[in-house]
Amino acid sequence: MSSKSKSKGNGWERECAKILSDIFGYHFERNKNGSGAFVGGTNKSRKSYLSDTQILSFMADILPPDEMKKMCVECKFYKEFPFHHFLIDKPIPILDSWIDQQLDIVDENNFWFIAFKINRAGSFIVIDSELLDIDERLGNHAIYYYQDKKYIVSDLEEFLTIYKEDIIKKCN
């Protein structure tokens, strides 16, 4: 990743941590050491001897507060995204790869989502529909199917604001 791309990604991670802090009222921090590769894939065995705090420090881009310790957030910032694929039921390989990366890292007790930002389009969330009871409060959103699972894609801040209390319960 070029230094410009890395700087852009780091900036989005800081912005995302601020969004989470503002919405939930707890302090979230950008993880300067985070790399899911350290505890994912062929390195999953490391989880057997690392403490919960150590594992968390390598799992996600955002370090959650103790009050929401089960939250695992991955941040992505891209120039473009093929939103039109939602309308024509066409796979989105980049989204598939993000989901695969997360599933490779998280444990079944984690509450995880992907926060992604697209230039001149906005900030969005991708979340497994089984993690929350998604209802009519959400309004407009996209449904994305990948490997026989249903994912919700929506505006990040709107989603977090609507489901704030439900998310807090799932994350502590």
Image (tube, rainbow, N blue to C red):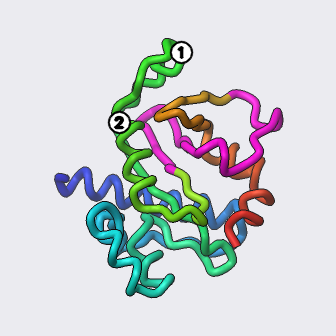
Q: Which residue position is annotated with label 1?
A: 87
Residue 121 belongs to magenta span? yes
Q: At 56% from the left edge and 37% from the top edge, which residue is drawn?
A: 149
Circle 2: element type: helix
* Residue found at x 41% / y 61%: 105
> How far apart are the two marked residues, 2 and 1, measured between alpha carbons?
16 Å
The span shown in magenta is 114-140
Vertical position of residue 112 compared to residue 31: above or below: above
Image coords of residue 139 (percent x, y): 76, 30
Asked if residue 110 shows in the view, the reply is yes
Residue drawn at point x = 45 percent, y = 33 percent:
120
The kind of residue tagged 2 is: Ile
- Camera-side residue of 61 and 108: 108
- The percent position of residue 127, horizontal first and vertical second, equals 58, 45
Residue 155 position (above or below residue 9) = above
Taking depth in this image into account, of 63 and 5 the one nearest to the observer is: 63
Query: Pointers 2 and 1 in contact (CB under 8 A)?
Result: no
